[in-house]
Image (spheres, rainbow, N blue to C red):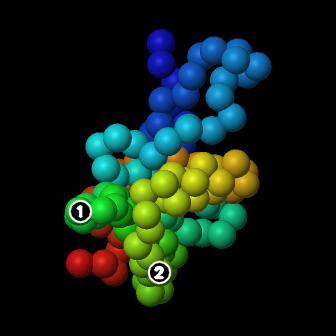
Amino acid sequence: MPRFDECGVQTSTMPNKDRPLVDRHAPKNGVGWLMNDQEQKVCRFRNDMPTQHAQWVVVETSPLRDSGQPVIRRMLRHNAIEAWETMQKSGGWKRCKPQALGMDEQITGIS
């Protein structure tokens, strides 16, 4: 029977020694969410319009509880993947679904 964490993400039933340290890449569907309970922030990674020479990702970081202004960055895809991996390896950021945060596909305050 599958188990789920507090964000609604299915947890693995394999032994800890066999689990990967982090999810290696951002989701293929173009949108991924990370949450940091300690910093009370949520971060959304989403594909942006590709150009002829590069693929871009928009990274939006916003306060989890209040309505502070989000920080929006545009990164090359390979840099965004590196940021995704580094954030999870830091120990504070974990994958999450927007439904678990009470959000749709948008971060609060971004239209």
- 106 vs 3, left or right, is left
Tell me which residue sits at (34%, 61%) in the image. 54
Judged from the image, the secondary structure of the residue bearing numbered disc 2 is strand
- 18 vs 69, left or right, is right
Nearest the camera: 22 or 50?
Answer: 50
Nearest the camera: 94 or 31?
Answer: 31
Tell me which residue sits at (66%, 69%) in the image. 39
Relative to 93, residue 38 above or below: below
Residue 89 position, x and y percent, is 70, 48
Q: Amino acid at mark 2?
A: Val
Relative to 20, residue 22 above or below: below
- 52 vs 99, left or right, is left
Tell me which residue sits at (70%, 17%) in the image. 18
Is disc 1 surrounded by few (<14), some (14 to 19) or many (20+) residues within 10 Å?
Answer: few
**Pointer 2 or 1: first along the chain:** 1
Q: Amino acid at mark 1?
A: Gln
Q: Which mark is residue 17?
A: none
Q: Quadrant of residue 36?
A: bottom right
Judged from the image, the secondary structure of the residue bearing numbered disc 1 is loop
Residue 95 position, x and y percent, is 52, 47
- Extreme-right residue of the structure: 17
Residue 8 position, x and y percent, is 45, 39
Q: Are marks 2 and 1 in contact (CB under 8 Å)?
A: no
Q: Which mark is residue 71?
A: 2
* Separation (CA) of disc 2 from disc 1: 26 Å
